[in-house]
Amino acid sequence: MDIYGAKTDLGWKGFAKMEEENKIEPKKKEKPGFLYEIYSLLHDLVYILAGITIVFVFVVRLVGVSGPSMMPTLQDGDYVVLLSNVWIGDLEGGDIIVARQESFRDGEPIIKRVIATQGQTVDVEYLPSGGAIVKVDGVVLKESSYINEEMREPTYMQCEFPFTVEEGCVFVMGDNRNHSADSRYVEIGQIELSQVLGKVLILALPGEGEGSSRDFSRIGAVS
């Protein structure tokens, strides 16, 4: 029994040893080479840039402000994020837009505030004191929060008031009324909606304006 038991034990050990020797080791994964990593990085970068391009072409744009006509809301040298006209929906009074008017400086883009939309009547009354008030459908606009200074009667030829905005158009003015060529100016007049490039959403990068430094606290939503 002892000899039989010893042989049996030896047999099991031998079998286990043979199984261990014949065991197939799993192949280790080879690390990707340097060129493959560069290729993967460039591949991902192309997709990221394509996505960014699509967003900035069809959804939003980055637009620079030139001139003082929208002070103090926007200053010369500011960069704003513009929501494309495809997505803006219906414009309302108070919206700030970028638009073109082919009759003005060969369609150079202008940035102004919407004062009235189609069907509304705009009236400007010049006061004996030298200032002026703006009315839309007979209601005086409360503009003290955004206009730069009290509006004076312009020296250039302006449209006749009261003025009713035609269908598919908007009437716009600059916040710096005394230094703004806008819908009051016969060369510009009302703006067709088809000429609106988009609505200003955010001040992304402040310009120096009339100062010598940038005020980064101005970054944020524009109203």
Image: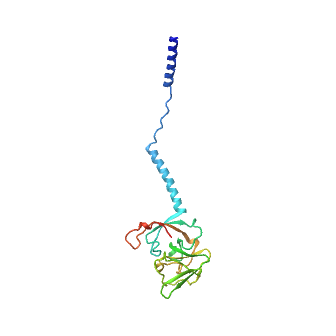
Relative depth, front residue between 83 and 137: 137
Residue 149, image x, y percentages: 46, 79
Q: Examine the rendering and report whether any part of residue 108 can be seen.
A: no
Relative depth, front residue between 63 and 15: 15
Number of numbered tags placed on the structure image: 0
183 left or right of 212 in image: right
Q: In the image, what residue occupies the spot 51% across and 86% down?
A: 127
Residue 179, image x, y percentages: 46, 79
Q: Residue furthest bottom?
A: 128
Q: Examine the rendering and report whether any part of residue 163 can be seen.
A: yes
- Quarter of the image for residue 121 reads bottom right
Q: In the image, what residue occupies the spot 52% across and 14% down?
A: 5
Where 190 falls versus 52 (above or below)? below
Residue 43, image x, y percentages: 49, 50
Where 34 falls versus 195 (above or below)? above
Residue 61, image x, y percentages: 51, 64
Q: In the image, what residue occupies the spot 49% across and 56% down?
A: 49
Q: In the image, what residue occupies the spot 49% across and 51% down?
A: 44
- Quarter of the image for residue 141 reads bottom right
Q: How is the image coloured?
A: rainbow
Q: Residue furthest left?
A: 212
Relative depth, front residue between 3 and 120: 3
- Quarter of the image for residue 78 reads bottom left
